């Protein structure tokens, strides 16, 4: 039986409704109306909901309309800044106008996006350590802007690149923020943004900010969640991983370096710097350098067992020298807020290092992340689902999770179990696109097992043939950087492959996508960063080729520990974790192809295991239903049949 809400939604989403009047190209979609109804019902009745909405459903409108109509206070959390900006600057104003219901909406970003007046003053006064010339050159323009900005949002400054070294020096982190002790607190842009958000009807945040609020890791800046009637988590497939990270204990070399630099600046500014403490600070920096040199060369993650005893000895030395810093700071008066905060930071680093070095390996995994010039030591709980569930249950509000990739087949358990949720309403809404007519799944013949030494070369040769059939306009996606580099080498050396080649790593991701959209017949080679969050509509992208089924690397220590934990309780780690993770990842990659009703194209999966192994059925069952072929000639004919579609 239709309710008044159902009737109203049908009218709003109808061909002659207000959304059609305000939105260019809007067309009624039964799938969109269905999702809007289940979201409206969840908000009205207060029950939690997980809804997978296939590509093309129009899920953003499907949750925004009932959110605005509800008259409730809603927090919307996204996984990317791109979607945050789209919601705030485009979707919410347009929908509010269409509904005739203007609402108070706030966009809240992480603190690194807001000017810190205290740190700007420190930099201006010349107390900051080792300031690059480029940062100093940007100071006059920054000071002028600082005098007129109302929000402090650094996105307002268009003439200073976002990767400029000045930004980390004039924005704060949770570590170096002085909080309410800061002389500039009454003019703090972060505090003002959070206070304004608390008074808004709808607040747009990201998953990191949401978790920071849930775990109360931003004390002194006002919580967002009290008073929220509903939290809508978009791009929810990435939420469990973000949530898990908040239960990490980690200490990074960068944190120690930043502390030493800030402490030196604060001591100089307070007139308390002397030779003795200078020598101690140098000793701390030296012990961190030695620890970094003690690690094996390269980047990536290392299990604790792989770390040499020399590295652990270096960590002990860092603890000793930081302890000396803390002792020397204890001899100073702490009326100076900056010095007091540095003393607290030194204590936090010492506590973190102590917890990591003494952690129980049965409860959490100790591991090291290596960068080219940095490292981070960590202890991560093997299963944080209980903690996550406890945080969610502690909020008296409705939770709605949505994404295009949440279910394996029609099973949501992999997603809900990672959040510790036993009972929750789920709904799967298929894509409205006619994949049977506009798409093909190409599974080439003749390729060996992915473990074969020549697998990458032969897979790239098959990809090359498919890219020639599509006349470029292709994403060739790889599960490893090694395969990516080999593919770039092979295709660049092929005289018959005369397509513009765009390779991940040659330019920033945004520039590569910009060039892909502008050029004719481009071929882009990428890894995981291009598997999601890319929205290229029309006929500029008609082939997405994937080299292997995206199983996570067995060498990753976190994965190995998680699998062992599942095995130790009698579970099947492959079926319970590795397979569903890979299926969801493949769904993300496949989702790059068909983005609109006029799109067409081919999904190519090179990995023969998708047909040869029993688990291959799980991958195929999770993809949109489309005709399969193993014949390259059929692919050529398919592309030829669409050659007059504006391509």
Image (tube, rainbow, N blue to C red):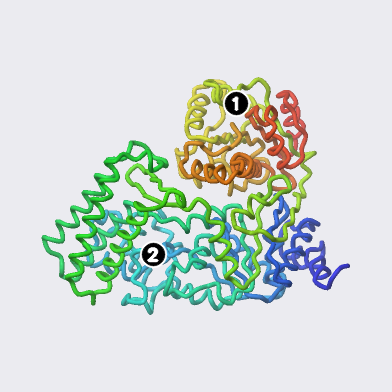
| Vertical arrangement, residue 187 with respect to residue 374, above or below | below
Question: Residue at coordinates 59% horizontally, 32% vertically from top-left?
Answer: 548
Question: Residue at coordinates 48% horizontally, 55% vertically from top-left?
Answer: 245
Q: How many numbered marks does the figure carry?
A: 2
Closer to viewer: mark 2 or mark 1? 2
Residue furthest left in the image: 275
Could you say which is closer to the camera, residue 572 or residue 402?
A: 572
Would residue 592 be seen by someone viewing this image from the given angle? no
Q: Secondary structure beneath disc 1?
A: helix
Task: Identify the image quadrant of residue 571.
Answer: top right
Location of the N terminus (image quadrant): bottom right
| Vertical arrangement, residue 354 with respect to residue 548, above or below | below
Q: Position of residue 252 (x, y in %)?
A: 35, 52
Location of the C terminus (image quadrant): top right
Q: Residues within 10 Å of mark 2 (few under 14, many from 20)?
A: few
| Vertical arrangement, residue 55 with respect to residue 195, above or below | above
| Vertical arrangement, residue 544 with respect to residue 289, above or below | above
Task: Identify the image quadrant of residue 145.
Answer: bottom left
Q: Are marks 2 and 1 in contact (CB under 8 Å)?
A: no
Q: Position of residue 27 (x, y in %)?
A: 78, 57
Sequence-first disc among 2 and 1: 2
Question: Residue at coordinates 63% horizontally, 29% vertically from top-left?
Answer: 606
Could you say which is closer to the camera, residue 63 or residue 401?
A: 401
Q: Secondary structure beneath disc 2?
A: loop
Would residue 308 be seen by someone viewing this image from the given angle? yes
| Marking on residue 174 | 2
Q: Residues within 10 Å of mark 1 (few under 14, many from 20)?
A: many
Q: Position of residue 6 (x, y in %)?
A: 82, 68
* Residue where numbered disc 1 is placed: 464
| Marking on residue 549 | none
Task: Identify the image quadrant of residue 600.
Answer: top right
């Amino acid at each position: 039986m239709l309710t008044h809400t159902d009737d109203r939604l049908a009218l709003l989403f109808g061909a002659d409704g207000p959304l059609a009047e305000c939105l260019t190209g809007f067309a009624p979609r039964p799938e969109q109306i269905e999702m809007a109804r289940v979201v409206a019902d969840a908000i009205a009745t207060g029950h939690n909901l997980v809804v997978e909405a296939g590509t093309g459903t129009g899920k953003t409108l499907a949750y925004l309309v009932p959110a605005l109509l509800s008259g409730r206070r809603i927090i919307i959390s996204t996984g990317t800044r791109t979607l945050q900006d789209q919601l705030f600057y485009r979707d919410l104003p347009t929908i509010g106008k269409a509904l005739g219901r203007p609402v108070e909406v706030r966009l809240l970003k992480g603190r690194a996006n807001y000017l810190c007046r205290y740190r700007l003053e420190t930099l201006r006064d010349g107390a900051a350590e080792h300031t690059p010339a480029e940062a100093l050159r940007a100071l006059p323009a920054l000071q002028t802007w600082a005098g007129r900005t109302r929000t402090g949002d650094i996105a307002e400054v268009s003439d200073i690149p976002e990767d400029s070294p000045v930004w980390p020096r004039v924005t704060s982190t949770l570590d170096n923020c002085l909080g309410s002790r800061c002389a500039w607190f009454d003019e703090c842009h972060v505090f003002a943004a959070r206070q304004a958000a608390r008074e808004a009807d709808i607040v747009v945040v990201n998953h990191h900010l949401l978790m920071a609020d849930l775990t109360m890791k931003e004390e002194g800046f006002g919580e967002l969640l009290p008073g929220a009637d509903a939290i809508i988590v978009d791009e929810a497939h990435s939420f469990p991983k973000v949530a898990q990270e908040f239960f990490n204990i980690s200490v990074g070399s960068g944190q120690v370096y930043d502390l030493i630099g800030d402490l030196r600046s604060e001591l100089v500014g307070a007139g308390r710097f002397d030779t003795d403490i200078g020598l101690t600070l140098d000793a701390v920096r030296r012990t961190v350098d030695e620890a970094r040199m003690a690690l094996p060369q390269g980047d990536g993650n290392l299990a604790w067992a792989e770390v040499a005893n020399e590295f652990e000895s270096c960590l002990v030395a860092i603890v000793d020298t930081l302890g000396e810093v803390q002792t020397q700071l204890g001899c100073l008066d702490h009326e100076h807020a900056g010095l007091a905060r540095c003393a607290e930071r030194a204590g936090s680093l010492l506590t973190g290092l102590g917890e990591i070095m003494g952690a129980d390996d049965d409860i959490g995994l100790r591991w090291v992340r290596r960068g080219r010039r940095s490292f981070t030591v960590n202890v991560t709980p093997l299963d944080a689902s209980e903690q996550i569930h406890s945080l969610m249950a502690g909020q008296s509000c409705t939770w709605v999770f949505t994404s295009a990739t949440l279910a394996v087949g029609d099973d949501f358990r992999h997603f809900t179990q990672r959040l510790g949720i036993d009972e929750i309403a789920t709904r799967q809404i298929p894509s409205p696109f006619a994949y049977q007519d506009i798409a093909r799944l190409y599974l080439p013949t003749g390729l060996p097992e992915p473990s074969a030494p020549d697998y990458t070369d032969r897979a790239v040769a098959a990809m090359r043939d498919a890219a020639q059939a599509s006349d470029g306009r292709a994403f060739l996606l790889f599960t490893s950087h090694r395969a990516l580099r080999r593919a770039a080498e092979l295709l660049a050396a092929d005289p018959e492959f005369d397509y513009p080649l765009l390779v991940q790593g040659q330019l920033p991701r945004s520039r590569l996508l910009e060039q892909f959209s502008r050029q004719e017949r481009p071929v882009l080679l990428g890894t995981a960063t291009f598997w999601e969050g890319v929205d290229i509509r029309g006929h500029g992208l008609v082939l997405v080729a994937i080299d292997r089924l995206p199983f996570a690397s067995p060498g990753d220590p976190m994965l190995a520990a998680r699998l062992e934990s599942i095995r130790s309780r009698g579970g099947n780690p492959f079926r319970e974790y590795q397979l569903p993770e890979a299926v969801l990842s493949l769904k993300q990659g496949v989702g790059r192809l068909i983005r609109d009703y006029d799109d067409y194209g081919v999904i190519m999966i090179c990995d023969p295991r998708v047909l040869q192994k029993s688990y291959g059925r799980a991958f195929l069952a999770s993809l949109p239903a489309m005709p399969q072929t193993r014949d390259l000639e059929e692919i050529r004919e398919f592309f030829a049949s669409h050659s007059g579609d504006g391509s």
